[in-house]
Amino acid sequence: MELMNKLDICVEVCPISNRLTGAVKPSESHPVCEFIKFGVPFVICSDNPAIHGAGISDDYNEFYKETNDNIILENMFYLQKKYSFMEDFYEN
């Protein structure tokens, strides 16, 4: 965690997919809580919306239910731009 923070490595977090695929067990806290604790940058994404029947808004909602942190949600667009491959496009 400290290394990801130090190297500014951004992690894509897909809350719904992580639960549905069993990557995160229902009884476990989502790893995003540790990312927040250690200052690891992350962006919330939606994985396979057609298959899971849920889109990005649903993933944002799951994140909020897990963390109760609306400040991160308010800054998510900034983070998505910062860590996207098209960062230079948004800056111009």
Image: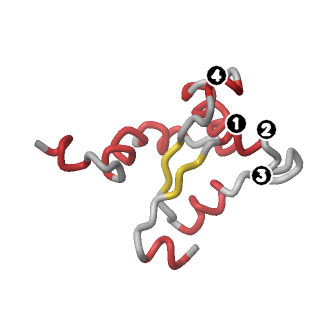
Dot placed on the residue nearer the N-terminal end, 2 or 4: 2
The disc, 1 or 4, on the residue closer to the chain's N-terminal end is 1
Identity, as a three-letter code, of the amino acid under mark 3: Ala
Q: Which residue is mark 1?
A: 16
Question: Up-down: is 54 above or below 86?
Answer: above
Left or right: residue 55 compared with residue 90: right
Quadrant of res 77: top left
Would you say 28 lies left or right of 41 here? right
C-alpha distance separating marks 1 and 2:
6 Å
**SS label for mark 2:** helix
- Quarter of the figure that contains the C terminus: top left
Residue named by callout 3: 23
Q: Nearer the viewer, mark 1 or mark 4?
A: 4
Q: In what element is the residue under mark 3?
A: loop
Mark 3 and mark 1 lie on one chain; the one further toward the N terminus is 1
Q: Secondary structure at mark 1?
A: helix
Q: Which mark is residue 33?
A: none
Q: Residues within 10 Å of mark 4 (few under 14, many from 20)?
A: few
Crowding near pointer 2: few (<14 within 10 Å), some, many (20+)? few
Residue for badge 4: 50
Q: How much space separates mark 2 and mark 4, taking CA atoms?
A: 13 Å
| Residue labelled with disc 2 | 20
User: Do the CB atoms of the residues marked 1 and 2 lie less than 8 Å apart?
Assistant: yes
